[in-house]
Amino acid sequence: MDIIKIIGIGLTSLIIIIVLRQYKPEFAVYVSLIAGALILFLVIDKIAGIISLLTELSNKSNMNSQFLVILLKITGIAFLTEFAVSICKDSGESAIANKIDLGGKVIIIAISIPIISALLETIINVLPA
């Protein structure tokens, strides 16, 4: 079970970070980054499976594949932003974390413009004139 491995990596990293903060606090961030990378490596197969499933469903439903690409980009940006924000907060840099969070949200909105415009266009076509 992957969740056991993920929890194990997380708790082991937490113990190492707690000990390191007493003696070498500058290394705690590195342990956090390594733990995040290990967890990402563990779930990459699941992510690939989800992407292939969504691609199959998109092909079967004749959905615009451009929208699926946009949704996957948005999801990736959200995950990466959250990871970076967590690292910054763990390092005590909440101001930088807030800026990264804001930047991620702005980029997500900018990328989603084609989906929003297609949705509004569909609503306008459905409404009676």
Image (spheres, helix red, strand yellow):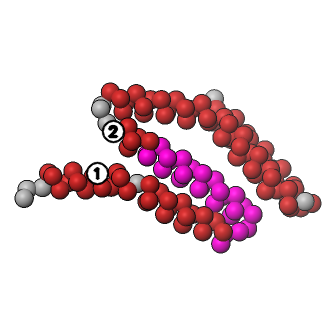
Which mark is drawn over residue 11? none
* Amino acid carrying mark 1 in the image: Ala
In the image, 70: left or right of 128?
Answer: right
Vertical arrangement, residue 82 with respect to residue 71, above or below: below
In the image, 114: left or right of 77?
Answer: left
- Do the residues bearing badges 1 and 2 touch, measured as CB atoms within 8 Å? yes
Vertical arrangement, residue 9 with respect to residue 94, above or below: above
The answer to whether residue 19 is magenta is no
Q: Quadrant of the N terminus?
A: top right
Residue at the limit of the structure toward the left, as seen here: 129
Q: Main secondary structure of the magenta part?
A: helix
Residue 18 is drawn in which quadrant? bottom right
Q: Quadrant of the C terminus?
A: bottom left
Whether residue 6 appears in this view of the structure is no
Which mark is drawn over residue 64? 2
Q: How many marks?
A: 2
Answer with mark 1 or mark 2, whichever residue precedes in sequence.
Answer: 2
The spot of residue 116 in percent (x, y) is 33, 55
Whether residue 48 appears in this view of the structure is yes
The answer to whether residue 77 is magenta is yes
The spot of residue 118 in percent (x, y) is 28, 51
Say which of 26 and 129 sits in front.
129
Q: Would you call the spot at circle 1 few (<14 residues within 10 Å), some (14-19), or many (20 or more)?
A: few
Q: Residue at x 40, y 27 (%)?
A: 56
Residue 66 is drawn in which quadrant? top left
* Amino acid carrying mark 2 in the image: Asn
Give the residue at mark 1.
118
The spot of residue 117 in percent (x, y) is 30, 55
